[in-house]
Amino acid sequence: MDIIGLIPQFGGLLYTIVAFVVALSVIVAVHEYGHYIVGRWSGIHAEVFSLGFGPVLWSRRDKRGTRWQIAALPFGGYVKFLGDADAASGKDAETMAEIYQRNPDDLRHTMHGAPLWARAATVAAGPFFNFAMSILVFAAIFLLRGVASDPMTVGTLRDLPGGVYQLEEGDEILAIGGVATPSFDDAKGWEGFTSSIPHQPVVTYDVRRDGQEMSVDGPFYFPPYIAQVAPRSAAMDSQLKSGDVITSIEGTPIFAFDQLKTVVESSDGRALALDVWRDGQTRPVTLTPRRTDEPQADGGFITYWRIGIVGGRAFDPATEATGLLDAVSGGVSQTYSIAKGSLSGLWHMITGAISTCNMSGPIGIAETSGAMASQGAQSFIWFIAVLSTAVGLLNLFPIPALDGGHLVFYAYEAVAGKPPNDTVLRVLMTVGIAMILSLMLFALSNDLFC
């Protein structure tokens, strides 16, 4: 056995595990803190706040009597409120009886003796905090990135093969290949803009430089440049990375991303030979496109052949600061879009419109965590925000043992004037846990066999 050869693989596995644990721990901590703090504000006492399950590695008790702990299995967490029998908030009848005998007024501080509004708010706070975290993270990234200057201005030029171009940083782009550049606010103007530019390796840019208008040569506006690599994709498996440039496909030189896209989409899944330029060196890469179900604006899905790369412009546009209100609005829109897309994808899997292989389990999420972390802190933080939205949404499903299931029980109580029978609740909770475990096993089988 080649022990030396296994070291990089072990290092990559360890990196993936650490990234997964960090991402999951942040999301769980935010979710459970939502339960804890709203419960505290509502007068419900928390006995335990735990990150992880199993043997306790570290703990301390605060002045309010809550034990904060970190457990050995970092795959979740829970808040155990006074009167709870377990992490799923089942009722501990014996403890409730003891509290009543000691002082009936203390039942107000239990999860099961508090007013309905307090219990509902405490349960709903977990998913709400997940959504709030996503919105804040997206808004912060939008603030950090800024918005593209209008008119379009050249920021950082890409390092591309093909020689030295006359385009310079700070040039205001008036037209490319004779096609006037639309305003960034003109969504319709951008439709078909790239396809309208003459497809040739060197394109004429009409620019304004130091107050003077002139024409200069530059690369094609959308070259076959890799701006981002999708996790668990053919490109990721072939070790392509952001900054690479694909110079030929199937032996044919290319200079536009559309040329690459056309060949990949018509490949019908056959292996493709690429030449990839990186840091002044060209190397051959062979990869096989994979079927991918992509969401559409109307809520449907279309299946394409993809290799898993996102293209980029020949340059990064210069940016200017964005307003706080616009950033928060963008964060809300991004979170809503993720939730809407997740629900649409789930519905299309249930109806058989798309493959159930689109559902990832713990292995798939761990691999994605490692892949996003490898692409930089901003990509990793963005992924955590996306996953936080998904976790918040999942917890709102009306399944007993999840937050959504508890909220359904509270809705029943509000209508009927009394909570469901304890025996019925126990049966429903058992069914809910079985459903959750079945879903986890199904997702895990996808990770292993899809």
Image (cartoon, rainbow, N blue to C red):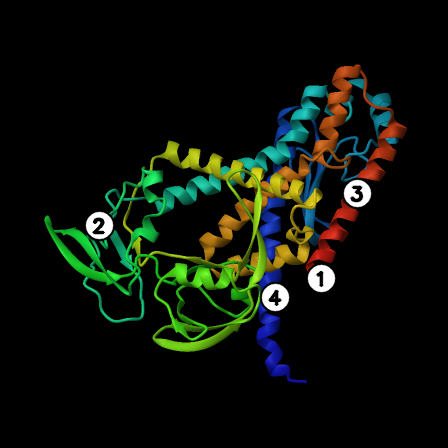
Disc 3 element = helix
Q: Label 3 vs label 2: CA separation?
A: 57 Å
| Residue 321 as seen in the image, left or right of residue 432 | left
- Is the Cβ of the residue at disc 4 closer than 8 Å to that at disc 1? no
| Residue marked by disc 3 | 435
Q: Label 1 vs label 3: CA separation?
A: 20 Å
**In the figure, residue 402 lies in which quadrant?**
top right
Q: Quadrant of the C terminus?
A: bottom right
Q: Label 4 vs label 3: CA separation?
A: 31 Å
Question: Which is more N-terminal, label 3 or label 4?
Answer: 4
- Is the Cβ of the residue at disc 4 closer than 8 Å to that at disc 3? no
Residue at position x 60%, y 73% in the image: 9
Q: What amino acid does circle 2 point to? A: Ala
Q: Label 2 vs label 1: CA separation?
A: 50 Å
Q: Which mark is residue 112?
A: none
| Number of dots carrying numbers | 4
Q: Looking at the image, is mark 4 or mark 3 nearer the viewer?
A: 3
| Residue 275 as seen in the image, left or right of residue 400 | left
| Residue marked by disc 1 | 448
Disc 1 element = helix
| Residue marked by disc 2 | 175
Q: What amino acid does circle 4 point to? A: Leu
Q: Looking at the image, is mark 3 or mark 2 nearer the viewer?
A: 2
Q: Which mark is residue 14?
A: 4
Q: Looking at the image, is mark 4 or mark 1 nearer the viewer?
A: 1
Q: Is residue 121 above or below residue 8?
A: above
Q: Label 4 vs label 2: CA separation?
A: 49 Å
Q: What amino acid does circle 3 point to? A: Met
Disc 4 element = helix
